[in-house]
Amino acid sequence: MPDPCLPQPAQIIERIEESPGLFTLRLCFTDPQVQRAYQFEPGQFNMLYLYGVGEIPISIVSDPKDEHVLDHTIRALGRVSKAMSRLKPGEFIGVRGPYGRGWPLLAAEQRDVVVVTGGLGCAPVVSVINYIAHRRERFGKLNIVQGVKHSSEFFWRERYDRWREIPDTRVLLAADRGDPVWPWHVGLVTELFDQLDFDPDHCSVMLCGPEGMMRAAVRQMLEKKVAESDIWLSMERNMQCAVGHCGHCQYGGKFICKDGPVFSYPELKPLFGTAGF
Amino acid sequence: MTIASPTTGFLLRSRLQSLLDILHQDGYTCIGPQLRDNVIHYDVLDSVDRLPQGLSDQQAPGHYQLSPAGHQRYFAWANGPQALKPLLFAPREALWQSQADTDGRLRFSEIIPATEPIAVIGVRACDIAALTIHDKHFLQQAYPDPCYQARREKLLLVAVNCSHPADTCFCASTGDGPHVSYGYDLALSELDDGFIVEAHTEKGLSIQSRLELDTVTAAQRETAHADNLHAAQQQTRSLPARNLQRLLFENLEHPRWEDIARRCLSCGNCTSVCPTCFCHSEFDDAALDGSSSNHYRQWDSCFNQGHSYIHGITIRSDTRLRYRQWLTHKLGSWHEQYGRSGCVGCGRCISWCPVGIDLTEEAAIICDEQDHA
């Protein structure tokens, strides 16, 4: 059995510039057998390795049903991601994964689903939305809420347009700061919650993005009488090993990499919002 | 394999070398305590002449000193800075290598360390407790660590029951010592003229059966027992016998954290000498000719700036938050992860803290319900 912690070579099939400093790498394992065997759950992540530089944890945005490519959307921000942003189609990187616990999609069946994301936080839930779109009859109403700081940072416009076409789906967008051609809400993403169409007694709320945004979203969802255990959050911390060994991602007693990155709110509640953890 | 009931015998001090010789015959490299740079540390040991005979240690917050003790015992001192940890979880090691061909195609290969059977002589109860924690962390989970495993499988432990704890020791209060009760192959109780040798596993029994042993007398047994009781009673430090997990997390805003932060240098010495701290960073080291790159791991510390870095943010930007992370993890959230405290009472973090911060004192102040009710 190959070492699950050893990267596998993958080729960049396509590089998509989503917005300045934000890019998607479309990858395919060079070994067809590895590509065929690779399976993941929405919400899981891979460690992407740039030769001679290092690794970063990146969530998988492509559809779990897509057998041919794996998409990772990355913000060029740190040492590794900046160097990775210069890669071109045809070049190679290493991929190991998938790691962690994804979104509770089985538990969400027959329920309304509310997906609230901020900034690049939408990346870890793209595969959730695609998953639901492909199995639409299994889920109740779908609400997709995305916020960005500035309207110019909004990306995947076509994707959101496409999601509006999914039956029984509401897409709500907000920018803290708009511009003359921003047609959607200007303000906080949580200000859109009154427009949501869902049953608080039978719903799964999935949150991903800056923790300040998630804190506000949790507060409002609880005010709407959503049960704590129906709120799920995807967390981020420094990760180097991805298997609960290196210790960087600890959040109280949790290892974000292996116990998460997706947690139910009650699991996080004792420390959630406490600076320094 | 643990044997049903331990067997014991008495080994004269003059015959201790025969234990090393038998271990050598069985193919073990012996690692044992010896004097280096004015501390007792563990290294390859071929002869009992290198053991720190007749030495005693004086330890206090930020203080460690050795001096002649006026007796001939080999193990009448408490642990120095080094635990078993570096023997199994290497301070720095390569995990895998990537190679690039001229087209940039990559090939990855594991690097499993070449290991040899190692017998460690003189392991104390606190370090066996720490080893058991590391076994849980590195092995008893979904992704067993191959490097740790390769070394662990070839490890034989000759424990020593502590007879002379340092002033910084508090293993009696954590329940991890001073007497070894599990996790070893052979255990020695040192008396003035020799050792009571107790076999705990089949491997230990096989070694014990080749030693020239006398029957243990009732008086010898009694002396060893008394030494052991004395070693526990001598300990003056202790951790508060309260629910530290609850109390620490209830007191995250206690003013004492700020007070500690004014003293703490954030140097990470405590995490280096701690036998249970497991944090490590991973990094690449590319060959100069560009044809390959090794992916390493290296001990890291939650006191380092980069430990909590995430896309432009440092979660623990100051010393208060870092010390609080360390202590709340070690004495608190560790319970959630491994079903027990992460502290085994070895006291190393107290002795080797350059400014002498004493976690037993800090925990007592922060968790004092009277003080902060």
Image (spheres, rainbow, N blue to C red):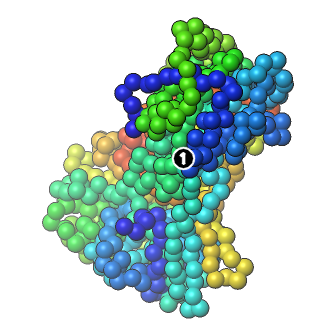
Q: The C terminus of chain B is located in which quarter?
A: top right
Q: Residue at x 45, y 48 (%)?
A: B139
Q: Position of residue A131 (x, y in %)?
A: 27, 68
Of residues B173 and B202, the one nearer the viewer is: B202
Going by the image, does A41 lie left or right of B179? left
Residue positioned 68% across, 18% down in the render: B193
Q: Is residue B239 above or below residue A106?
A: above
| Tag 1 residue | B26
Q: Position of residue B269 (x, y in %)?
A: 73, 41
Q: Report the residue at 60% width, 24% height from top.
A: B11
Secondary structure type for disc 1: loop
Q: Nearer the viewer, residue A24 or A191?
A: A24
Residue B247 visible (yes or no): no
Residue B247 against residue B203 in the figure, above or below: above
Where residue A118 sits: x, y (%)?
A: 46, 61
Task: Locate residue B248: give its quadrant.
Answer: top right
Q: Quarter holding the N terminus of chain B?
A: top left
Q: Chain of mark 1?
A: B
Circle 1 crowding by C-alpha within 10 Å: few under 14, some 14–19, many from 20: few
Q: Residue at x 71, y 35 (%)?
A: B48
Q: Is residue B14 above or below residue A237?
A: above
Image x and y of residue B10, in percent: 57, 21
| Camera-side residue of B229 and A88 | B229
Q: Which quarter of the picture shows residue B211?
A: top right
Q: Outermost residue toward the left?
A: A137
